[in-house]
Image: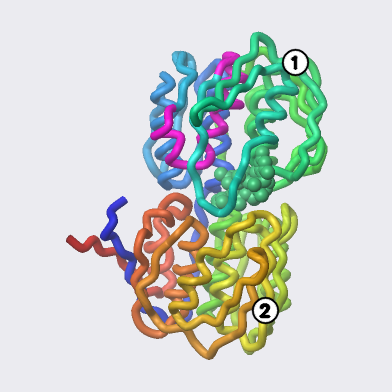
Amino acid sequence: MSGKERMLITGGQPLQGEVRVSGGKNASVALIPATLLSDEPCVIENLPDIDDVHALVDILRSLGAEVDYQPGAQMRVDPRHADGYTVGYEDAQRLRASYYFIGALLGRRGKAHVSTPGGCRIGQRPIDQHLKGFRALGAEVEERSGMVQAEADRLVGNVISFDMATVGGTINVMLAACKAEGQTTLINAAKEPHIVDLANFLNSMGATIRGAGTDVIRITGHPRLHGTVYQVIPDQIETGTLMIAAAATHGDVTVHDCIPIHMDALSVKLLEMGMMVTATGDSIRVRSTGPQRSVKVTTQVYPGFPTDLQQPMCALLTTVPGTSRVEETIFESRFRHVDELNRMGANITVIEQRTALITGVPELYGAPVTVTDLRAGAALLVAGLMARGQTEIYEPWYIDRGYEHIEEKLRSLGATIRREVSQ
Ligand code: EPZ
């Protein structure tokens, strides 16, 4: 990351054509730590070439695992000599998903000392539900000077009821429960596609996980899991971001290699706005064929409207006639992109921290803006593609955490976008 790195976009052209979506970030960052639960090498295919994946490779290697990773190809992890159990501050701070090494190391060897995670500043983001789950499985868990120290002589299955549907909590406790003796039941489990993908991955290693994708997941622990070859699912949020960019630029884009059913909440919302959305096999086509209508968007856990698409959706809504209302129910401070969009001529007011009122303006105009978090970056990308003139996006490295080769993809759809490092 370079402080003076900028992304330059000249907006105003409709995106046209076809694009392939990459493997899912939020699935990949769960599968990669999960390889530590195996006693044999695992191969994961279709991983996105993004900084979060690179960070996890470094952490696996620091724990002693052998990782053969060619970006854009497959990753082979041989965990047999992974004798470490500590993930330090610098590594853990690089991404949110570093905390999955707590569940994975507890499951692997009953001991994990992992510094508290980094990740997007979109709210307080406590991990109390994760720790509650580990303790219910018999682990002693202490939080001391920014480190989570979890240790267990034995992990024993239990019933764990989450106080809210937490993606990270469901994943982390599932990782540990795979190796706990007997049955574990997760109640009020998260249902996101990446939860199902992790369960399928673990089951392909010999785990016994039933009910992933519903709010009750039942896990029967096993002392050993074997190797596997597995392909990570497509990225639901990258797919949605590309669909939103197509709509925002009044274009006509087909996204290939996606799973349309994962996109239903967004597809229905775009249809409500007057867009044409057509799903065929593993492709979705979005066409903006006429006037767009203002809408109400409320973020929900899956299968509701994803909170990760709230920010790019705000960008799309800035030039839709009328007033749209966006309610963010998952995170308490996920509107940091609003100030930047208003610098580009948008008319957005945030009320009571969790609701944005967006009054449509005729057009946005290019301006220098700064990325504050990954999906705020997506919002500014979309706004730059819409705006008249040039937009300079500072701190674009956030975007690289979750979108593989995004400039290339957008250029292939006709966008004028490039990156510049000024001295
Ligand atoms: C995951 O974050 C994703 N990150 C987020 O995507 C996504 O926005 C979020 O799930 C919701 O879908 C990864 O998968 C790496 P949560 P996570 O636990 O696990 C509260 C992106 O842009 N909570 O489902 O942190 C929490 O504060 C990122 O790709 C507790 O109170 O989300 C939040 O309000 C951003 N205690 C709510 O639950 C806990 O122990 C949902 O959080 C855990 C969570």
Is 190 inside the magenta-drawn segment?
no
The residue lying at 46 percent from left, 46 percent from top is 48
Q: Is residue 8 above or below residue 48?
A: below
Is 97 inside the magenta-drawn segment?
yes
Among numbered discs 2 and 1, the one appearing first in the sequence: 1
Q: Which mark is residue 324?
A: 2
Residue 336, percent across and down? 52, 64
The kind of secondary structure element at disc 1 is loop
Residue numbers of the magenta segment: 88-111
Please tell me in which quadrant of the rendered image residue 293 appears: bottom right
The residue nearer to you, when weighing 378 against 343, is: 343
Q: Amino acid at mark 1?
A: Val
Residue found farthest to the top: 153
The residue lying at 58 percent from left, 42 percent from top is 27
Residue 54, percent across and down? 40, 39
The residue nearer to you, when weighing 113 against 207, is: 113
Tell me if label 2 and label 1 are in contact, CB under 8 Å. no
Tell me which secondary structure the magenta stretch mostly adopts.
helix
Q: Which residue is mark 1?
A: 156
Residue 126, percent across and down? 62, 41
